[in-house]
Image: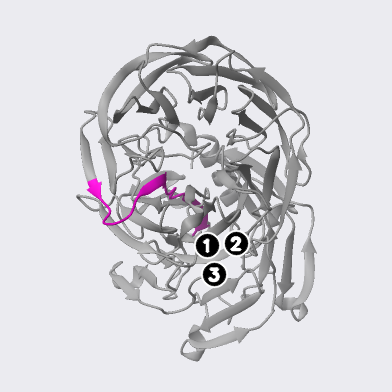
Amino acid sequence: MQTVSRWVRGIMGVGLLWAAPMAQTAPWAVMVDSPHAQISTLDFGAIPPTVYGPFLSGQLGSAGGGLFDVVVTPDGQNALVSNFGDSAIYRISLANPTNPVATGCISNGFFAEDIAIAPNGRYALVTDGGFSTNVAIIDLTTASFSTSITYAITSGYAQAVSISPDSQTAVFCDYWAGKIIAGVVDPARGLISETALSCGNTGRPVNVAISPDGVTVLVADAATNEVYVFKIVSPGVIVTGDTPVVRGLLTNQAMQSIAFSPAGDRAYVLQNGGGTNNTLAWLQVNGPGNVTVGGTNVAKLISQGQSQLFGVDTLAVSVDGVWALAGNPTLSGSTNVLARVNLSTFAVTPMNVSTQFPVGVAFVPTPIYAFAADFDGDGLADPAIYDSRTGTWTAMMSLQNYARQSVSNFLGGPSYVPAVADYDGDRLSDPTVYQLGTGSWRAKFSGNNYTQLDAAGFLGGLGWSPTVADYDGDRKGDGGVYQETTGNWKIKRSSLDYAELALTAFWGQSGYTAVSADYDGDGLADPCVYNRTAGAWTMLMSSRNYAPQMFAPILGGTGWSPVPADYDGDGIADPAVRNDATGTWKVMRSRYNYAIIEATLGL
């Protein structure tokens, strides 16, 4: 009773404990080499940034097809690239960015050019670079990368697309009719509604961007030096902005790409044409739908060109807002040099990429992972987050009334995910990370004064995610991995000198995350999977001879990540979830008949 009341008091007061923002970095980017149908990755954690590649020559369709756009999934684990001439979208694993792997291909039978991924990671939209109303909707909720539908827009053509931060509204550019089309997306059917608005009598909208707050929409024009401004007022509903048109950019150049700053107070515009080098301008976002010119020709870029590509993002801004990368907005006048722009000084640094001709560019998100573990040994789980951008760990320590403690650059980094357990049996959870692409593990054991231990290729690899728990009941965490596409598991039990146990088609499938824990309190971890869409928890209870059991009621679903742990100190794991957008945690406490407690922890 006392432990639970202490937890409630602690989380209700968390807002007063911490207000400092976390440091952000953008350590990796991806660029496509259009004429050669290959990619390279760029490590921005190095000074100067290091270029790796080129990669995947001959695996991303024909070189003559034209590799154009690149986008990265919100979890930073996969990229999608478009091959225009081959009418194909390729998926690439970025789990190890120094060795990307092609993992799938989808074709909807039209010239694939622009791609947008929904911020919730559930679907992607692809538009046609020709004369077509077709839009491909690719299902990203399964690991197979094999399901898509084609939707025909009824209000016009679709040459470029952007998706709002809430993943509900899509905005398309109709280049030929000089208008935009907006609607609510149903990933299973297409647009539920369509609204069309004109970009003026001479408008040729070629690209579109939506602000981080999901309100301001900016449309790049390929025929003039104007940017059109709109506002999203509700899902699928768009109106003309308070400043309908932004004028005052370079008169002899049109534009290809627009990219917002992370804060949404600025938007950067890549202009080209006029027989001179491409240039960078920036716009000041004064409020929703209210945009003015901030600066023109603030940076002279590397390449030249007289035309544009439909929707292809040849300009990208890092997640910390420090850098911009600019590729070639067209193949005419292209060079084999990327422009790296310091957005504080607008100084341009050329990045030679050998014989490649960079077109689409994208920075790789490196997300924050939430979990809970007993770091202070009092029997109560401590809510925590791990920032894979910097290897920073932050926990709310129950023994200290849930005061927040944070350690920067402690363990891990990009491509590493948390795999925390008490591996040495001293009742203290040991910070541990698992590298998704290689199956390598890094741990800092509390019983060894948190000295780092590296185990290269210990368990897992590409396509496997960690599911660590005490499967053999010896009070030590056992390394475990789960392959979502097959339901295969591999476990190394500490009581058997870490001999590997392979379980084929054991438990789970595409769309399910492994969340093993001791849900029945018998000292043995129960294999469990969580449906990321529906929020259903299904487990194999060790106390019932591992018979399947569906946990009721439903907890979580789309937008919620599982964070099960023993929050109330009764020796039984409590199902719990965290909202990825708001930081709200929901815990079903076994001690209290699984009543739900909810709090926004600021984690």
| Residue 554 x %, y % | 76, 52
Q: Residue at x 64, y 33 (%)?
A: 170
Residue stretch rendered in magenta on the structure = 351-373
Q: Nearer the viewer, residue 279 or 580?
A: 279
Q: Is residue 564 left or right of residue 51?
A: right
Query: Amino acid under label 2?
Result: Cys
Label 3, on which residue?
463
Numbered disc 3: secondary structure: loop
What predominant SS class does the magenta segment belong to?
strand
- Marks 2 and 3 in Cβ contact (< 8 Å): no
| Residue 287 x %, y % | 49, 14
In 3D space, how far apart are the residues under numbered discs 2 and 1 (Cα atoms)? 9 Å
Q: Is residue 313 left or right of residue 113?
A: left
Q: Nearer the viewer, residue 151 or 393?
A: 151
Give me the disc on residue 61. 1
Can residue 379 be seen here? no
Label 2, on which residue?
105
Badge 3: residue crowd in 10 Å (few <14, some 14–19, many ≥20): some
Numbered disc 1: secondary structure: loop
Which residue is outermost to the top?
A: 242
Q: Is residue 14 above or below residue 254?
A: below
| Residue 268 x %, y % | 38, 27
Q: Nearer the viewer, mark 1 or mark 3?
A: 1
Numbered disc 2: secondary structure: strand
Q: Is residue 160 above or below residue 588?
A: above
